[in-house]
Image (tube, helix red, strand yellow):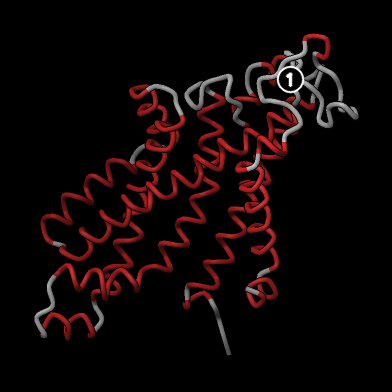
Amino acid sequence: MWTFVRRKPLGAAGGLVLAVMLALALLAEGVAPYGYDEADIFSRLKAPSEAHWLGTDNLGRDLLSRVIYGARVSMAVGFGGVVVGLLLGTAVGLVSGYFGGRLDLVLQRVVDAFMCFPLLLVALTIMALLGPGLGNVILTLGLVLGVRDSRVIRSAVLSVKAHLYLEAARALGAAHAAMIGRHVLPNILAPIIILGTVNLGAIILTEAALSFLGFGVPPPRPSWGGMLSGAGLVHMLRAPWLALWPGVALSLAVFGANMLGDALRDVLDPRLRGGR
């Protein structure tokens, strides 16, 4: 860990940012000074003060508390979407790359069909069918990114499949399940971990876009994207802190995820380490 911090300080800083946000999400009830839906009509659109460090919104709700509770939504969607996406992408990539043949041809044509459309457009279409909700957002973003990640995982499987130790295991009579679980999967864990950290920022940003458009987590539960729309748009000139602080929190989360992903890519991928 100390070697990683010394060699990749930006990656370590990104990991620290994500760790702090994850801790705030888990301890939101004890950290937030107010409830996320606790309104005070006499404190509407108040500037940052000692009572409300980040100000209040158009309903008199404390903005700091809503940003902290919004971290819970973003972290849940981010890590949940990464888990769903990696499970789906790993399953499709392993099956497609290992078995090959017609099965590989059919699966890759389905992946090509998904990749023909922008990520946000596909996510909006699925959310329009499923309806808004935290679970639906996690499932949708995990599905969309998992299908796209399967192409990268398939290429890693094809690279591992060409090694001689797989031919030796096959000659000794190893079953397909044993070869996948013992020889293929452990050797592609590095790109899987890298994909997970890189996709974390993309999922958080896409969830904010869905919430901004009204297809994400429904109110009154706060989300950073939802806070940027609605009252944040209407009162942005009069109370700029309504859009400033959710935007800062969203930027820090995406920055932390991207920096950590880049650092892990350099550390875990031997081809990117360099050397004398």
Please name whichever residue, 105 or 19, is drawn nearer the observer in this view of the structure.
19
Q: Is residue 267 left or right of residue 49?
A: left
Instruction: Residue at 62%, 32% (x, y): give it.
Output: 224
Residue at the (65%, 42%) spot, across then down: 27
Say how many tags the image has: 1
Residue 228 percent coordinates (x, y)? 65, 26
Quadrant of the image for the N terminus?
bottom right
User: 27 and 198: which one is in front?
Assistant: 27
Q: Hey, which residue is sitting farthest front in the picture?
A: 30
Q: Which residue is mark 1?
A: 61
Q: Is residue 123 left or right of residue 161?
A: right
The quarter of the picture where residue 58 lies is: top right
- Report the residue that reaches farthest toward the right: 50
99 lies above or below 119: below
Looking at the image, the residue that sits furthest to the bottom is 276
Tell me the element at label 1.
loop
Q: Is residue 91 above or below residue 235?
A: below
Across and down, in percent, residue 234 comes to: 70, 14
182 w.r.t. 86: above or below: below
Q: Residues within 10 Å of mark 1 (few under 14, many from 20)?
A: many
Looking at the image, is 207 positioned above or below residue 132? below
Q: Amino acid at mark 1?
A: Arg
Q: Report whether 263 appears left or right of 96.
A: right
Q: Residue 65's x, y, as percent?
A: 72, 30
**Can you give x and y, in whole percent of width and height, for residue 233 in the image?**
68, 19
Residue at the image point whose x is 55% and y is 81% from the top: 274
Give residue 49's quadrant in the image.
top right
